[in-house]
Image (tube, helix red, strand yellow):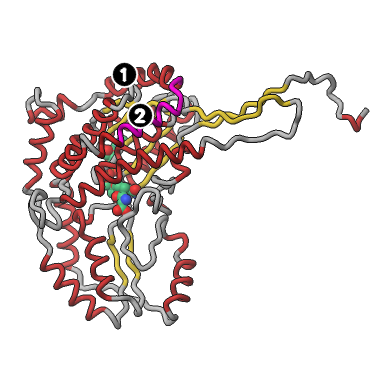
Amino acid sequence: MIGDQEHRTHLIQHQVMPHKHSHKLAKFYYATSELVQKAIETALQARVSWERVPLKDKFDMWLKAADLMAGKYRQDLNATTMLGQSKTIIQAEIDSAAELIDFLRFNALYAKEGTKWQPRSPEPNVTVNKLRLRGLEGFVAAISPFNFTAIGGNLAYTPAMMGNVVLWKPSDTAILSNFTIYKIMREAGVPGGVVSFIPSDGPVFGDTVTKSPHLAAINFTGSVPTFQRLWAQVGENLPNMRNFPRLVGECGGKNYHLVHPSADVTSVVNGTIRSAFEYCGQKCSACSRAYFPESLWPEIKEKLLSVQKELKVGDVREPDSFMSAVIDAKAFKRITGYIEHAKASSKTSIIAGGKYDDRSWLTAATEALKDSAGNFYINDKSTGSVVAQQPFGGARLSGTNDKAGGLQYALRWTSPQAIKQTMVPLTDIKYPYMV
Ligand SMILES: NC(=O)c1ccc[n+]([C@@H]2O[C@H](COP(=O)([O-])OP(=O)(O)OC[C@H]3O[C@@H](n4cnc5c(N)ncnc54)[C@H](O)[C@@H]3O)[C@@H](O)[C@H]2O)c1
Ligand SMILES: N[C@@H](CCC=O)C(=O)O
């Protein structure tokens, strides 16, 4: 279903840039390489004063923004995510209001906790021995995907909270909701230039930031080929860089449901339908492979088909819609291509089952599949990670597994400096035993 696409594009064009002609969106609104370059310079200037703002004040801004999102702007966030990204009421709510608010609040909490730790020195003459957490030197490029409004907010604003300046390139198909976040953060007190919101053509942005000697980090979520390209470009330009840019990337997945013969069929069916089809399966964690035991397949198949008949594909504004349009015509074409391919193929999936009881099978599976996934859920569907409950990050080519929504994430955006001061002069090069 792509019917909503035109309407959504129209709405984005008129809301984000009402003064422009909608059909000229790409020409007028997208930043050129020169503009991206200018934004880098602005960011580097803003960094000087942003670094001086105490962490505590930054945390307060983030908490204020979370309150604004939970109150005054909750509907704006949900509505722009529904209309801009074609999310149903519940999918928009769990993403753009709830998850985003959780990211802001928990990251501030974790950063507060994480920054408390200080090294100790047993030396009586060492008067200062501490760790200072600075922002990274240079700027961070945050490049976000279409499918989660909250992810855009997290990619740009967690590094900013830790003292970094950020150039945020939203996805072409999530501009409206992402711009709403930007405006709320400004209202919460984040000064201009700390995060620059820069819709632009992907390669134009990517090529420009990876050429800059001041690139400190890339915080990316999107597809594997895009991240591979960015990584290779950073490698190529490394001789001109002032430091080794930190590359954090969360990419696509090929998540599976692996069902044991002792499984509860209703739970399997509901979990699989939700994981595979909510938001049209456009989540990186969506179930895209399933291995069912032969013994259960007839019952599972029957129930899957009967539940599937009840799912309404419709306008996101209708509360009983289970799913709606896919994100754009490109995605529509790709998905219909898979369907045609499946129709033409005579092959079927081969299913393997274990012969253990429930518990030992789970233990064995947890070990055998240890390296196959960054998030491994037992007796559950593959989607639905919650900030602070299941920190999220992919294994293998699914990402660098930096676990958004977890304790370590905020600290990843700091450059720790160990500071030691001693007041006792060193009078000799010889150690006492040498004398
Ligand atoms: N692992 C996770 O946490 C997670 C979360 C959400 C989405 N995803 C993955 O994201 C993908 C969907 O997002 P998408 O379709 O927006 O991915 P995408 O790779 O097409 O785009 C991601 C972002 O990169 C930009 N981009 C494209 N080419 C670029 C270039 N050469 N240089 C710099 N930026 C460039 C895009 O404009 C967009 O902002 C899926 O594969 C999904 O599984 C992963
Ligand atoms: N946090 C999301 C996945 C994000 C990727 O698209 C989930 O688990 O549903």
Question: Would residue 400 be visible to someone looking at this image?
Answer: no
Q: What amino acid does circle 1 point to?
A: Lys
**Badge 2 local density, few (<14 within 10 Å), some, or many (20+)?**
many
- Residue 20 location (% of width, % of height): 9, 24
* Relative horizontal placement of residue 132, taking residue 277 as reference (left or right): right
Q: Which mark is residue 409?
A: none
Q: Circle 1 sits on which residue?
A: 38
Tag 1's secondary structure?
Answer: helix
**Badge 1 local density, few (<14 within 10 Å), some, or many (20+)?**
few
Dot in front, 2 or 1: 2
Up the image or down, 42 lies above or below 372; here it is: above
* Residue labelled 1 has its Cβ within 8 Å of some atom of ligand 1: no
Q: Main secondary structure of the magenta part?
A: helix
64 is within the stretch colored magenta = yes
Which of pointers 2 and 1 lies earlier in the amino acid sequence?
1
Q: Quadrant of residue 203?
A: top left
Along the line of sight, the residue nearer the viewer: 199 or 270 = 270
Residue at image coords 39%, 52%: 389
Q: Quadrant of residue 255?
A: bottom left
For the record, the magenta segment spans 52-66
Q: Circle 2 sits on which residue?
A: 61
- Residue 90 location (% of width, % of height): 19, 52
